[in-house]
């Protein structure tokens, strides 16, 4: 969503990014979804302005009012060395940060895991240990992984999806991806690999409707 992106130094464009995000959240509320999953780069900058933070909190509070959880991971644009903005929103009850312990949705029918954006140089060193698969999970529970990376089988990839699926200690039904700004969907074995695309154009090259 790249909230706070002051594209072309234009306040109008900054507002466009917020309006696009607001539309998605309004749709989520209207559709009474089980959860909203954000695959990283909520903010365009690791140092969003106070105004950007307040506007984002205001939008996320609309989900909280109707008890729709907002699950997220940290993208490369907003990543800080220690505490993340997502942690602040979690403290406030506005969001939940995905990780190696699953977040359950739909009365436990879906378990969602997350991997924050990993710098290219650290991908070969990624530690797959620590992912939890609670014994209490229903037998037919769907398991989703959220990542913020460019992955194979898509072009310009830094990470191989087949390797990720092989190394996870559970059968993954789908990988939900952020970082690539266009909608894409493919299959790797039995797992769906999909990019939702960005909510607003970040460059003139993203010209599709």
Image (spheres, rainbow, N blue to C red):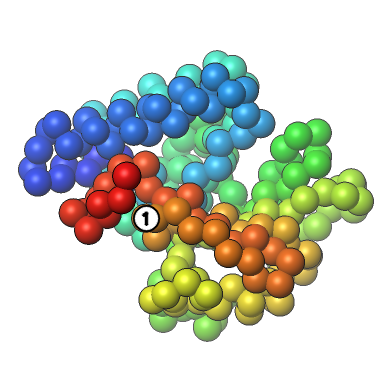
Question: Residue at the spot x=54%, y=21% of the render?
Answer: 29
Dot 1 corresponds to which residue? 181
- Which quarter shows the N terminus? top left
Q: x%, y% of residue 27?
A: 49, 25
**Residue 193 seen anywhere in this rendered image of the structure:** yes
Q: Horizontally, is 159 left or right of 175 in the view?
A: left
The residue positioned farthest toward the front in the image shown: 209
The residue positioned farthest toward the left in the image shown: 9
Question: Residue at the spot x=77%, y=69% of the render?
Answer: 169
Question: Could you tell me which secondary element the residue under label 1 belongs to?
Answer: loop
Q: Around disc 1, counting alpha carbons within 10 Å, would you say few (fewer than 14), some (14 to 19), or many (20 or more)?
A: some
Residue 80 appears in which quarter of the rendering?
A: bottom left
Is 161 above or below relative to 146?
A: below
Question: Residue at the spot x=66%, y=31% of the render?
Answer: 34
Q: Nearer the viewer, residue 178 or 91?
A: 178
Q: x%, y% of residue 44?
A: 28, 48
Q: Nearer the viewer, residue 152 or 118?
A: 152
Q: x%, y% of residue 59?
A: 40, 24
Q: Nearer the viewer, residue 13 or 94?
A: 13
- Which quarter shows the C terminus? top left
**Residue 129 seen anywhere in this rendered image of the structure:** no
Total label count?
1
Residue 54 appears in which quarter of the rendering?
A: top left
Q: Horizontally, is 188 left or right of 152 in the view?
A: right
Is 92 above or below relative to 1?
A: above
Question: Residue at the spot x=53%, y=27% of the render?
Answer: 28
Q: x%, y% of residue 124?
A: 52, 83
Is 128 above or below relative to 107?
A: below
């Amino acid at each position: 969503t790249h909230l706070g992106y002051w594209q072309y130094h234009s306040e109008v464009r900054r507002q466009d990014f917020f309006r696009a995000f607001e539309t998605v959240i309004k749709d989520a509320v209207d559709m009474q979804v089980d959860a909203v999953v954000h695959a990283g780069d909520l903010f365009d900058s690791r140092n969003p302005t106070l105004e950007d933070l307040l506007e984002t909190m205001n939008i996320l509070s609309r989900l909280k009012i109707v008890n729709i959880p907002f699950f997220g991971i940290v993208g490369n644009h907003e990543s800080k060395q220690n505490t993340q903005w997502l942690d602040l929103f979690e403290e406030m009850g506005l969001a939940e940060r995905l990780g190696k312990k699953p977040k359950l949705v739909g009365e436990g029918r879906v378990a969602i895991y997350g991997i924050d954006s990993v710098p290219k140089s650290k991908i070969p060193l990624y530690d797959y240990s620590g992912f939890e698969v609670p014994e209490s999970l229903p037998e037919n529970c769907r398991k989703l992984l959220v990542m913020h990376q460019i992955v194979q089988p898509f072009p310009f990839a830094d990470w191989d999806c087949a390797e990720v699926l092989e190394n996870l200690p559970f059968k993954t039904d789908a990988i939900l991806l952020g970082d690539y700004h266009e909608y894409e969907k493919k299959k790797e074995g039995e797992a769906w690999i999909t990019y939702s695309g960005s909510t607003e154009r970040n460059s003139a090259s993203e010209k599709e409707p």
